[in-house]
Image (tube, rainbow, N blue to C red):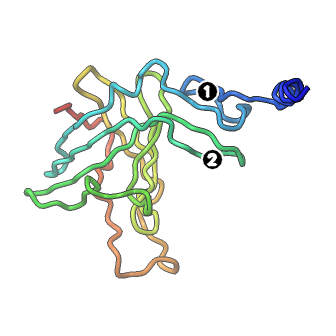
Amino acid sequence: MKQIIYILIFFTIPCKAQQILPLNSSAFKSQTNSYFKDINNELDDYTGIWTSNFDNKTIKLVITKEIKTPFKMWNKNFYTDQLFIKYEVKKDNIVLESTLNKDFTADSKLSIEGSKIQDNSITLVFSGGNCSVGIGTINLKKINATQFSWGYYPGTTTRIDTLCPPDREYKIHLPETENLIFTKQ
């Protein structure tokens, strides 16, 4: 009799499996805890170490693929595969800005991440630096297996004087340009 009760309880408790969806699926109508997976490994084309030169500066990008990263949208929790970029900008071999050794768990300033793939390109979000100066989007468009073009579109390039302390650096070091070619190392 006890076994029958346990069996009935087991079958009456609703079980929901995690829904796995392609990377570019809409989260709007997806169930909570859905996982937007890079099923076709499209993000892999962008991973690795990439370099370029712009305005007498050397830019190094270290791009990694993060698996099952949690995010929240419309008061629901989800997971996604995404790219995460750490970078270093040098001029005359002097480091102007580097996130290569930065731990982003406590401070998301200067982070670059995203997973929206469309037409052989990916759109990422740059969180900006102090007071979010430089916040904007970065588009990477695959040219071939060893090159992509870069486009950076900052939404704001100045600080709000009344809200931001004057003793911080507010310069954007990432190349503000389109069609900058990066080469895989």
The answer to which quarter of the image holds residue 11 is top right
Q: Considering only vertical position in the picture, is 141 above or below 124? A: above
- Residue plotted at (11% across, 61% down): 94
In-front residue for pair 169/113: 113
Pointer 1 with pointer 2, Cβ within 8 A: no
- Residue plotted at (32% across, 72% down): 169
- Which residue was labeled with disc 1? 25
Q: Considering only vertical position in the picture, is 120 above or below 81? A: above
Q: Secondary structure at mark 1?
A: loop
Of pointers 1 and 2, the one earlier in the residue sequence: 1
- Of tags 1 and 2, the one toward the viewer is 2
**From the viewer's perspective, is 55 left or right of 117?**
left
Q: Considering only vertical position in the picture, is 51 above or below 158? A: above
Q: Quadrant of the C terminus?
A: top left
Q: Position of residue 5 (x, y in %)?
A: 89, 29
- Residue plotted at (47% across, 78% down): 161
- Which residue was labeled with disc 2? 72
Q: Position of residue 49 (x, y in %)?
A: 22, 37
**From the viewer's perspective, is 40 left or right of 46?**
right
Q: Secondary structure at mark 2?
A: strand
- Of the residues shown, which amino acid type is indicated by label 2? Lys
Which numbered tag is attached to residue 158? none
**From the viewer's perspective, is 100 left or right of 21?**
left
In-front residue for pair 159/124: 124
- Of the residues shown, which amino acid type is indicated by label 1? Ser
